[in-house]
Image (tube, rainbow, N blue to C red):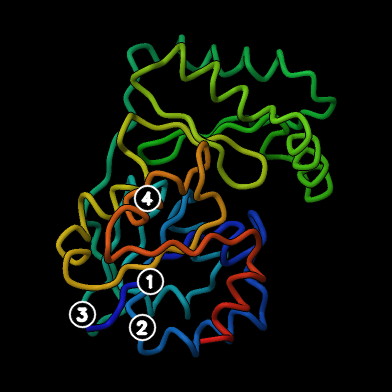
Amino acid sequence: MKAIYLFDVDGTLTPAKSKMNKTFAKEFQEWQEDKLVYIVSGGSFPRIIEQLGSKIVENVEGVFACMGNVYYKRREQEREWTLVYENKFKVLSRKVFFKDLTTVINESSYHTKTGRHYEERTGMVNLSVVGRNANQEQRSAYEEYDAGLKEREKIVSKLAYRYPELDFVVGGAVSIDIFNRGNDKSQVVTRVLKDELENRRVKFFGDRTYFPGNDYSLAEILRNHPNGEVIAVETWEDTQRWIKEQ
């Protein structure tokens, strides 16, 4: 029985918030031809297509976007997609919540803030200190800053204490993903592939598979299941090397 392959996008198949390397994209297309592949990303469905390209996305079994909060399944023998489910992000007081996010950004001592610091997606909110207007140089500078001071992890701890009904995890290279408790990437197994996991091997590739990373919840389920396997990578090049060695 064929194995199932689950792939994160940012940092696993592509550089963060960037398109897939052209050479790797070609290699991946050839590799996936006879495989059961699912995409599992914090980004939106259109963003996933933009990063991976339509040829790769058209040949996967399904796409879990926005941290698994929206799931699209490819129709058999067709290149059309069916929306299976989508979650809504819920918080007691939206006004207070988004005011608190603004306060967190203002209190950060980081020197460059480019604007568009949070974005609401299906079932989740994405937060960034440097901001979504940042260019690649500014993103890389914040990534280096955060690697030293662990600012995002500190923000996660602070907000998690204030909002126990929500989960906060470090995502991508510069952001934090926020969602209702349990509405994370673990939904891939708990809502969709639970029966499959009992009968076939399920392999997950991710670059943030340890707490407080946004791949952690899914990775933990698979690490603790006899049919699960986690391939923890640091960059998309690690995934490329794995594909070539198979």
| On screen, residue 96 above or below 152 | above
Look at the numbered discs 2 and 1 and tell me whether their residues touch, using CB distance below 8 Å: yes
Residue type pointed to by label 4 = Leu
| Image location of residue 125, percent across then percent down | 47, 33
Residue type pointed to by label 1 = Tyr
- Distance from disc 4 to disc 2, alpha carbons, whole Å, reads 20 Å
Residues packed near mark 2 inside 10 Å, few (<14), some (14 to 19) or many (20 plus): some
Q: Horizontally, is 223 left or right of 96 in the view? A: left
Q: Earlier in the sequence, mark 1 or mark 3?
A: 1
Q: Earlier in the sequence, mark 4 or mark 2?
A: 2
Which is nearer the eye, 20 or 114? 20
Q: Earlier in the sequence, mark 2 or mark 1?
A: 1
Q: Which mark is residue 218?
A: 4
Q: Which mark is residue 76?
A: 3
Which is nearer the eye, 173 or 220? 220
Residues packed near mark 1 inside 10 Å, few (<14), some (14 to 19) or many (20 plus): some
Q: Which mark is residue 35?
A: 2
Residue type pointed to by label 3 = Glu
Q: Residue at x 32, y 50 (%)?
A: 221
Q: Earlier in the sequence, mark 4 or mark 3?
A: 3
The quadrant in which residue 6 appears is bottom left
Provide the secondary structure element on which disc 3 rests.
Answer: loop
Residues packed near mark 3 inside 10 Å, few (<14), some (14 to 19) or many (20 plus): few
| Image location of residue 186, percent across then percent down | 32, 47
Look at the numbered discs 1 and 4 and tell me whether their residues touch, using CB distance below 8 Å: no
- Distance from disc 2 to disc 1, alpha carbons, whole Å, reads 8 Å
